[in-house]
C-alpha cells in the first residue's frame, strides 16, 4: 500500500463508499503478512517509495508463488521477483497469471511509464544477466532503460 492508495481508502470510508469493516480487513495486512516462512512487507512502499523486490534464491517454487500472491493481494504497485529458476517461474506464473518473465526476473503490475531514463552500462558479456535484471526492475517501475553493453573495463584507461 502506498500513500495514494491509503488516502483513497480513507476517502472511500469517509464518503461511505467503503464500509469501515472492509477498510479494517484491507489494513489488517499492514505492515506485513506472516506466511510462516516469510514476512511479506506491505508497508515498504509507504516507507521507501517502492515496494520490496523478492529475491528468488533459497526459496521453493511454492514459497515464491505464495509470496507473489500475497504481494498482489495486499498492494497495488509492481511485484518483482529476481533470480528465479525455471521451476520458480513456472510455478509463480501458473499460480499468478498476468506476470511477465524477463530473463531470470518476474514482474507483475508494471507501473505507468515515467519520463526518467537510466543508462545501464556493463563491461562484458558475463555482466549481461545482471544488466537484464536491472532493466527488468527499472521497466517494472516505469523507467525506460538505455544500455551500453560490452564497453570493457580496459576502455576506462
Image (cartoon, grey):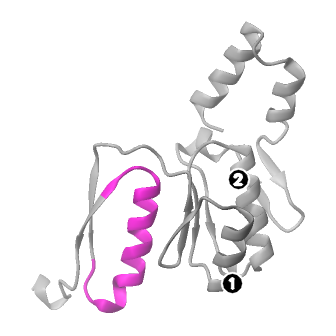
Q: Is label 2 in contact with label 1 (beta carbons under 8 Å)?
A: no
Closer to the observer: label 2 or label 1? 1
Tell me which numbered mark, 2 or 1, is placed earlier along the sequence.
2
Q: Main secondary structure of the magenta part?
A: helix
Left or right side of 135 for 59: right
Which residue occupies the foreground of this view, 92 or 157? 92
Left or right side of 115 for 9: right
Residue 70 falls in image quadrant: bottom right
Place of residue 123 in the rendered image (x, y in percent of width and height, measured from the top left): 25, 85
Which residue occupies the foreground of this view, 106 or 27? 106
Number of on-image labels = 2
Quarter of the figure with the C terminus: bottom left
Label annotation for residue 87: 1
* Residue 131 against residue 23 in the figure, above or below: below
Place of residue 111 in the rendered image (x, y in percent of width and height, measured from the top left): 47, 46
Residue 19 falls in image quadrant: top right
Point 80% across, 33% down: residue: 27
Q: How many neighbours does mark 2 have within 10 angstroms: few (below 14), some (14-19), or many (20 or more)?
A: many
Label annotation for residue 71: 2
**Which residues make up the magenta segment?**
122-144
Quarter of the figure with the N terminus: top right
Point 56% across, 78% down: residue: 83
Left or right side of 48 for 118: left
Q: Describe the element under mark 2 as helix, strand or loop.
A: helix
* Residue 23 against residue 36 in the figure, above or below: above
Q: How far apart are marks 2 and 1 (CA)?
A: 20 Å
Amino acid at each position: 500500500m502506498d500513500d495514494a492508495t491509503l488516502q483513497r481508502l480513507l476517502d472511500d470510508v469517509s464518503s461511505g463508499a467503503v464500509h469501515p469493516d472492509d477498510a479494517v480487513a484491507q489494513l489488517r495486512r499492514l505492515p506485513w503478512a506472516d506466511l510462516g516462512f516469510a514476512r511479506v512487507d506491505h508497508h515498504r512502499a509507504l516507507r521507501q517509495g517502492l515496494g520490496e523486490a523478492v529475491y528468488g534464491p533459497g526459496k521453493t517454487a511454492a514459497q515464491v508463488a505464495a509470496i507473489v500472491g500475497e504481494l498482489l493481494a495486499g498492494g497495488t504497485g509492481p511485484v518483482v521477483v529476481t533470480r528465479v529458476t525455471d521451476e520458480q517461474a513456472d510455478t509463480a506464473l501458473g499460480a499468478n497469471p498476468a506476470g511477465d518473465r524477463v530473463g531470470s526476473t518476474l514482474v507483475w503490475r508494471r507501473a505507468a511509464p515515467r519520463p526518467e531514463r537510466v543508462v545501464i552500462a556493463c563491461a562484458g558479456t558475463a555482466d549481461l544477466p545482471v544488466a537484464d535484471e536491472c532493466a527488468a526492475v527499472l521497466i517494472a517501475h516505469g523507467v525506460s532503460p538505455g544500455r551500453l553493453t560490452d564497453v570493457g573495463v580496459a576502455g576506462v584507461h
